[in-house]
Image (spheres, grey):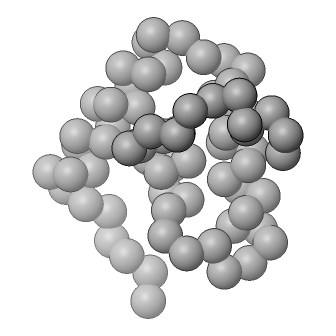
Amino acid sequence: YHLRTFIKPGITGLAQVRGFRGEARTPEDIAARLQSDLIYIENWSLALDLGIVLRTMWQMLRPPPTAV
């Protein structure tokens, strides 16, 4: 969890485009976000950042269905 502090927060991220956004209601939600953050830290590249930006724009145009 401490590794997350090395990355500055942004307006989007790998966890958000993978669908782990909103309120974290269970420990599994928190674990999924943490895992996505660690994957981002370990695999950072310009291509990964561009992919996140493109996926963010796509989800702005075609939002995924929300769970009720």
Q: In the picture, residue 66 is in which quadrant?
A: bottom left
Residue at the far bottom: name it. Answer: 68
4 to the left or right of 58: right
Q: Quadrant of residue 2?
A: top right
In the shown orientation, is residue 33 left or right of residue 27?
Answer: left
Work out whether 63 lies above or below 59: below
- Residue sitting nearer the eye, 67 or 3: 3
Instruction: Give the residue at x 77% y 68%.
Output: 28
Give the residue drawn at x 25%, y 60%.
63
Decide: is 5 above or below 62: above
Quarter in which the N terminus is drawn = top right
Q: Residue lying furthest left in this view?
A: 61
Total residue callouts: 0
Taking the image as shown, residue 48 lies to the left or right of residue 41, namely left
Q: Residue at x 63, y 30 (%)?
A: 7
Rendering coords of residue 25 (x, y %): 66, 80
Name the residue rendered at 66%, 18% in the picture.
43
Please state, as top left, top right, bottom left or bottom right, where the C terminus lies in the image: bottom left
Horizontal and vertical percent position of residue 59: 27, 50
Pick out the residue farthest to the right. 2
Whole-percent x, y for residue 34 in the image: 73, 49
| In the depicted structure, whether residue 15 falls above or below residue 67 | above
